[in-house]
Image: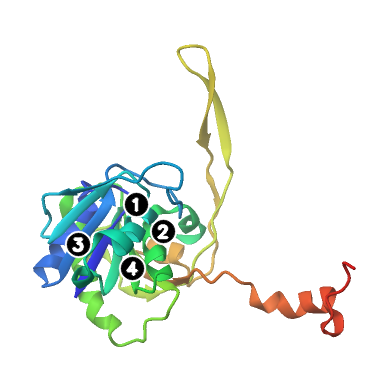
Amino acid sequence: MKILMSNDDGMYAVGISVLARALSNAGHEVYIVAPDQERSAAGHSLTLHTPLRVTEIEPRYGAKRCWKTNGTPGDCVKIAINAILEENELPDMVISGINHGPNLGSDIMYSGTVSCAMEGAVMGYPSLAVSYCGNDFVPHNFEYTANLIVKFLPKLSEINFPKRTIMNINVPGCKEEDINGVVITTLGAKTYSNEYEKRIDPRGKEYYWMAGELVTDGKNDRTDINAIRWNKVSITPVTFEMTHRSIIPALEKAFCPDGKCDWLE
């Protein structure tokens, strides 16, 4: 399988190196287009007003070819498919990660890791976002996650991978022997007491630092948040189709009674 890899932690991050090597060792043809530096929390932003620079570098991590860019995670996938890869290099799948830290619940709205996978889905490719939910980012801590993804890929052939959808995979940051299996989950809800601390720099000028704490993270048993709390691998199907369809009839009744939306006249 041809796999396009990217991330938001940058080309030289431990997570992408371990996963790329595991996929390559399993016989997959890996191509990497990744940011030249960390771009965490970039969301699904794209570079529109400055030049997007791409540099091919010496292949590493078992990949066939590698490029680094000064763009966002979303840029990486978009430019890879539209401009960088040759026709015979176009991927069968896009994989983002392994991210250094979790991507759970509503936090995925800000995630560069998830945005890579979403851009792949937007462009019609089956896509995975993979995250390791620990704090100690050394190579051996990513190996279980990488091996899990290698085993996960053949399972995907058993389903009709839905369009406009990614699989958001989070792996607990515990010892391998303490993992309690795999569970299919929904996105949890996270609420923060967002606060901005006002500080003064050495030149006497004000600046702000975002702080705050997690207030509630939901109690639904099937959420990704609780799966990680219980040391289970979480697999969440996520779609970028954000239309709230159930409210459409009520809106039509209020704004377009009898099929006539003429109340602005």
Amino acid type indicated by mark 1:
Gly
Regarding residue 171, the answer to whether it shows in the image is no
The image quarter in which residue 159 lies: bottom left
Q: Where is residue 140 in the image (x, y as percent from the top left)?
A: 15, 54
Q: Is mark 1 on a helix, strand or loop?
A: loop
Q: Position of residue 40 (x, y in %)?
A: 38, 46
The residue at which mark 4 appears reads as 128
The residue at which mark 1 appears reads as 101
Q: Position of 102 compared to 29: left or right?
A: right
Q: Residue at x 28, y 72 (%)?
A: 93
Gap in Å between the C-alphas at discs 1 and 2? 15 Å
Gap in Å between the C-alphas at discs 2 and 3? 18 Å
Q: Nearer the viewer, mark 1 or mark 2?
A: 2
Q: Which residue is drawn at 54% across and 40% down?
A: 212
Q: Which numbered marker is on residue 115?
A: 2
Query: The C terminus appears in which quarter of the rendering?
Result: bottom right
Q: Earlier in the sequence, mark 1 or mark 3?
A: 3
Regarding residue 98, the answer to whether it shows in the image is yes
Q: Position of 188 compared to 66: left or right?
A: right
From what the image shows, is residue 65 above or below residue 52?
Answer: below
The residue at which mark 3 appears reads as 31
Q: Which numbered marker is on residue 184?
A: none
Q: Which of marks 3 and 4 is nearer the N terminus?
A: 3
Q: Position of 24 compared to 163: left or right?
A: left
Amino acid type indicated by mark 3:
Tyr
> Is there a contact, CB below 8 Å, between mark 1 and mark 2?
no
Gap in Å between the C-alphas at discs 2 and 4? 10 Å
